[in-house]
Amino acid sequence: MLLQDFNKTIPDIVRLDYRTADVFKKYGINFCSDRDMYLLEICASKNLDYNSILEELAEATKTITISSSLHFSEWKISFLIDYITNVHHEYMHMAIPSLEASLNLFVERRKKKHAEANQILILFRELSVLLMTHSRHEEEIIFPYIRQIESTHRRKETYGNLFVRTLRKPLNNIKKEHEVIMSVLKEIQSLTNNYFSQSNASVDQLAIYNKLGEFHKDMEQHTYLEDYILYPKAIAMEKELLQL
């Protein structure tokens, strides 16, 4: 967003870019009810540093893209695991509590007007449990195991086949877990009309639907990297080690 875009009422700023909602929430600025208040006015009334908030808003609305020309399949397994953990898992752990809190508030305010809101919240809570369990399983068991077999495979260790037979983990089950996770996300996607809110939608609905859409897109890339690159590579190495 450009600097002049922040010289608007609080709801108008959120309508321009939903990512500003989290900044306002951090400072206790109610972007749903401060309809006639401009950012400068609300900062003065709450004794907030206007320039500091401008900086945070500018930072929150930066768009960082990853080139589609990157060849993820050529990355070393250890680096790919680090990328998945530090980018996708980290984002997931940060986004889930914030989204659940926003959905809770939305349901409290709009459950009569938006009958689907409570079902979205129920599904998101289910998704949260699935993802927390799944990511812990990956980080504590699956990823360390893949690192070990990658190291064993690279060194062509003679005990490789024994190692795999003794410690082999159910990598095939991971894809099934992903299918369950994505099926819940698709239910949420359907209930939100593909995360689309009408032009007359409330500001909080617009912000939440956009955040859910962002979360869905991240999960799609996350599962793609695991299902189509990381785990097939690990399974191929397992097979080769079993031949030693």
Image (tube, rainbow, N blue to C red):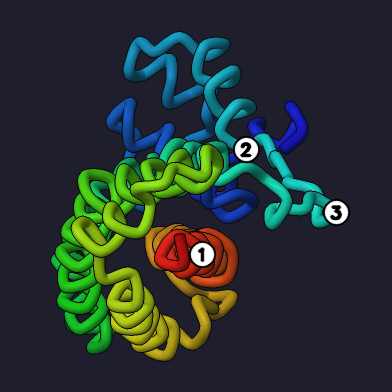
For label 3, the residue is: 69
Front disc: 2 or 1: 1
Which label number is shown at residue 240? Answer: 1
Q: Is residue 137 above or below residue 65?
A: below
**Amino acid bearing label 3:** Ser
| Residue beneath the point at 40% across and 62% down | 208
Q: Position of residue 111 (x, y in %)?
A: 18, 78
Q: Is residue 77 visible?
A: yes
Q: Is residue 68 above or below residue 127?
A: above
Which label number is shown at residue 61? Answer: 2
Q: Is residue 240 above or below residue 43?
A: below
Q: Quadrant of the C terminus?
A: bottom left
Q: Quadrant of the N terminus?
A: top right
**Amino acid bearing label 2:** Thr
Q: Earlier in the sequence, mark 2 or mark 1?
A: 2
Q: Is residue 220 visible?
A: no
Q: Quadrant of residue 54?
A: top right
Secondary structure beneath label 2: loop
Whole-Å distance between the Cαs marked 2 and 3? 24 Å
Secondary structure beneath label 1: helix
Whole-Å distance between the Cαs marked 1 and 3? 30 Å
Secondary structure beneath label 3: loop
Q: Position of residue 50 (x, y in %)?
A: 52, 14
Q: Position of residue 136 (x, y in %)?
A: 21, 50
Front disc: 2 or 3: 3
Front residue (pair 206, 153): 153
Q: Earlier in the sequence, mark 2 or mark 3?
A: 2
| Residue beneath the point at 48% across and 87% down | 193
Within 10 Å of disc 3 (Cα), the crowding (few <14, some 14-19, many 20+) is few
Whole-Å distance between the Cαs marked 2 and 1? 47 Å
Residue 55 horizontal side relative to residue 202, left or right: right
